[in-house]
Image (tube, rainbow, N blue to C red):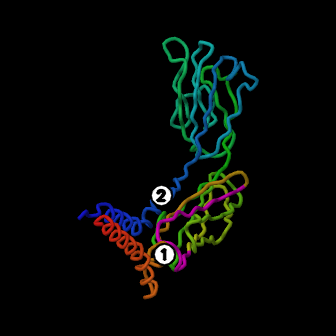
Amino acid sequence: MTKPRFAPIVALALLIGILGGGSLFSALLPVVPRVHAATDSVFLKGYFQAWNFTSTNMNPTITVHQDDTVSLTLQSLDGSTHQFLVDVDRDGGSLTDDCPSIDPCSSLFGGTGLPAMTHYNFPVNFAAGNYTYYCTIHFTSMLGTFQVLPDFSISASPTAAGVVAGGSSNFSVSLASLGFSGTVGLTSSVPSPATGVTASLTPSSVPLTSGGTGSSVLKVSTSVSSPSGSFFITVTGTAGQLSHTAGVMVTITGGVLGGFAQAGSTLQLVLAWAWVAVPLVAILILSVAFTRRRKI
């Protein structure tokens, strides 16, 4: 008598797939990354006559948003020594006594014994407005406008919550002005696999004054037919060309699995078990038939 070797393995694999499908599906969902402010890359070429002297855009205006990070690449192309500085306290480009504690400034570059190129990163953690950037050595010719535009930030709390299918959960959406003054419109987005899940924002627009804060309530509601699993809901705040997002994770329990409810009424429970049992019975019948054929 030859025993079937593979049918039990197939049956076990199918059972694991059926019972674990919801968890696997949740694990495959894309994770909404935490949103950070932008990184602005700037490349300046140093000549004693002007920054970027040989280009058509000498001493270019550098435009960033508050709370950005500036990533500078600086290169001396005239053999002279240079140093980049943003005059935040507006006391002149030749003074380096408060550099870099107040005025962001690079190391010296170019000239004898110094590297011709250097990199310097700094956060834009000062107020929105127009500043001047200099070369601290050639400050009368190497200077330009450093423009910090107003912005706002958005966050959600808590970042994750659990809810039983048919229930709801509230999240606080916080906005903070970074020199921005105006109204921020809010919208929400629910991933398509999260059937029966809705998200609403109250209010859907938040006015901000410069340096002020505001808030809204995100309500995520589910239905008894919502699938079990973890789903990311995104909230987008928009004001003109400014747009930022925040994400929250909602984990639904007691929802549907493969089209039938995990828990609830007796009928739902019977249907759920039938959904698991019917394929297994079919596999067992095929296994018996295969064994009998082998015996013949």
Quadrant in which the C terminus appears: bottom left
Is residue 100 rendered to the left or right of residue 19? right
Sequence-wise, the earlier of marks 1 and 2 is 2
Position of residue 218 in the picture relative to residue 230 (left or right): right
Where is residue 102 drawn, in percent x and y?
54, 37
Which residue carries the number 2 mark?
A: 28
Residue at image x 62%, y 52%?
178
Number of marks drawn: 2
Residue 162 lies in what quarter of the image? bottom left
Location of residue 2 (image quadrant): bottom left
Whether 14 is drawn above or below 271: the answer is above
Pick whichever, 128 or 222, lies toward us. 222
Q: Residue furthest bottom?
A: 266
Amino acid type assigned to the residue bearing label 1 in the image: Val
Q: Which mark is residue 256?
A: 1
Outermost residue to the front:
296
Which region of the structure is painted magenta? 221-239
Expressed as whole percent of the image width and height from the top left, the position of residue 130 reads: 69, 40
Q: Position of residue 136 (x, y in %)?
A: 60, 24
Residue 117 position (above or below residue 91): above
Pick the front one: 249 or 265: 265
Residues at discs 1 and 2 in contact (Cβ within 8 Å): no
Q: Residue 283 in the image: state x and y as whole percent.
A: 38, 70
Query: Vertical placement of 72 versus 291: above or below?
Result: above
